[in-house]
């Protein structure tokens, strides 16, 4: 290993007086890099602790393979570098690979820049298509993650559904207050999945259809009739059994985001004569909280 005179970087990015010149120091750094040393080993050997100076010393010199951590993007990185060497811009590489331009920039920043021969309009179109491709790949990954997670659940036992239902109600159902007695079971939600789980939970508890009442609250500018049809089919009740729909007035100063075909308002599900059931739900919830108290949790394996 060659002998060196030590150099330290100052806070301004320069080299202190009395040290090796930058060119000589870079020659030493490049030699060490090509011998297979890591960035940290070169830093310690040359005593260059200013990251900016160290980056300049090693500019254009790739790290040895042994320092690289294998990851799922290694193939993308290699392909991005290959395309860059073919003269592609970030936009074209993004369109080809579907990864973000920030990642591409990190992967190919040491490679020469291609000549730009496109018009601004052509560049904008390529950038737009590249971003659309990136969003498509992200959405595919998002859906794959959700499908894999859904498969993790499998069938629910009665006890698992029971515990899920208690937590669901305590999150979304009405609560009794000391200053206002509300010992009745009322659940309001706009998520059809939550409604299905909640109704399955009520069925598990022995609550039958004759003890249930349904009503809809929806914005006055939405399609109330379509919402009534949707919710009545979901809960298995005839439209004639729904209570009168409540229409929310439009405030012209607000910008509504819940619009379109997917907006169906909120469904309210009331259980008649449910004071005793409410007290049991509150007790079940207290039991769950007690079961995960810190002292008990520390005993779990």
Image (cartoon, rainbow, N blue to C red):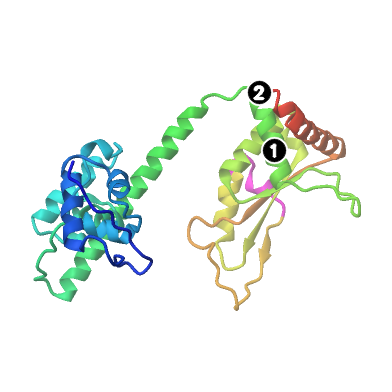
Which residue is at the front of the view, 191 or 296? 296
Q: Which disc is residue 91 wearing? A: none
Position of 51 relative to 182 (above/below): below
Q: Where residue 61 sits in the image (x, y, percent)? A: 18, 51
Q: Where residue 128 sits in the image (x, y, percent)? A: 25, 64
Which residue is at the front of the view, 229 or 129? 129
- The crowding category of the residue bearing disc 2, from other C-alpha atoms within 10 Å (few below 14, some 14 to 19, many at least 20), is few
Mark 1 to mark 2 CA distance (whole Å)? 14 Å
Residue 81 lies left or right of residue 146; in this view the side is: left
Element type at mark 1: helix
Residue 184 lies left or right of residue 70; in this view the side is: right
Q: Earlier in the sequence, mark 1 or mark 2?
A: 2
- Name the residue carrying label 1: 167
Element type at mark 2: helix
Q: Quadrant of the C terminus?
A: top right
Quarter holding residue 34: top left
Q: Which is more foreground, mark 1 or mark 2?
A: 1
Q: Where residue 103 sits in the image (x, y, percent)? A: 29, 54
Q: Is-magenta flag for residue 235?
A: yes
Which residue is at the front of the view, 263 or 2? 2
Residue 183 lies left or right of residue 219; in this view the side is: right
Q: Quadrant of the N terminus?
A: top left
Which residue is at the front of the view, 73 or 259? 73
Q: Is residue 45 visible?
A: yes
Where does the magenta region start and end?
Answer: 233-243
Q: Is residue 206 visible?
A: no
Q: Which disc is residue 158 wearing? A: 2
Residue 53 lies left or right of residue 277; in this view the side is: left
């Amino acid at each position: 290993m060659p002998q060196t005179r030590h150099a330290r970087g100052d806070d301004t990015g320069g080299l202190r007086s009395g040290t090796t010149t930058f060119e000589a120091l870079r020659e030493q750094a490049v030699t060490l890099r090509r011998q297979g040393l890591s960035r940290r080993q070169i830093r310690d050997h040359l005593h260059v602790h200013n990251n900016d100076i160290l980056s300049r010393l090693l500019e254009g010199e790739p790290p040895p393979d042994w320092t690289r951590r294998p990851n799922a993007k290694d193939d993308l990185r290699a392909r991005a570098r290959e395309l860059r060497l073919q003269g592609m811009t970030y936009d074209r590489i993004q369109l080809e690979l579907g990864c973000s331009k920030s990642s591409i920039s990190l992967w190919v920043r040491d490679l020469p820049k291609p000549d730009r021969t496109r018009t601004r309009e052509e560049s904008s179109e390529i950038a737009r298509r590249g971003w659309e491709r990136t969003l498509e790949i992200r959405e595919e990954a998002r859906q794959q993650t959700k499908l894999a997670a859904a498969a993790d659940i499998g069938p629910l036992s009665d006890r698992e559904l029971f515990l899920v239902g208690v937590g669901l109600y305590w999150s979304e159902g009405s609560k009794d207050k000391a200053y206002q007695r509300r010992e009745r079971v009322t659940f309001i939600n706009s998520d059809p999945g939550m409604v299905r789980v909640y109704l399955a939970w009520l069925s598990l508890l022995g609550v039958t259809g004759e003890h249930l009442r349904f009503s809809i609250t929806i914005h006055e500018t939405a399609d109330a009739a379509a919402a009534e049809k949707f919710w009545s089919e979901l809960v298995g009740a005839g439209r004639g059994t729904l209570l009168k729909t409540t229409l929310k007035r439009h405030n012209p100063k607000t910008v509504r985001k819940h619009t379109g075909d997917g907006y169906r308002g909120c469904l309210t599900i009331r259980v008649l004569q449910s004071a005793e059931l409410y007290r049991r739900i509150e007790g079940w919830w207290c039991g769950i909280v007690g079961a995960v108290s810190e002292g008990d949790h520390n005993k779990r394996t």
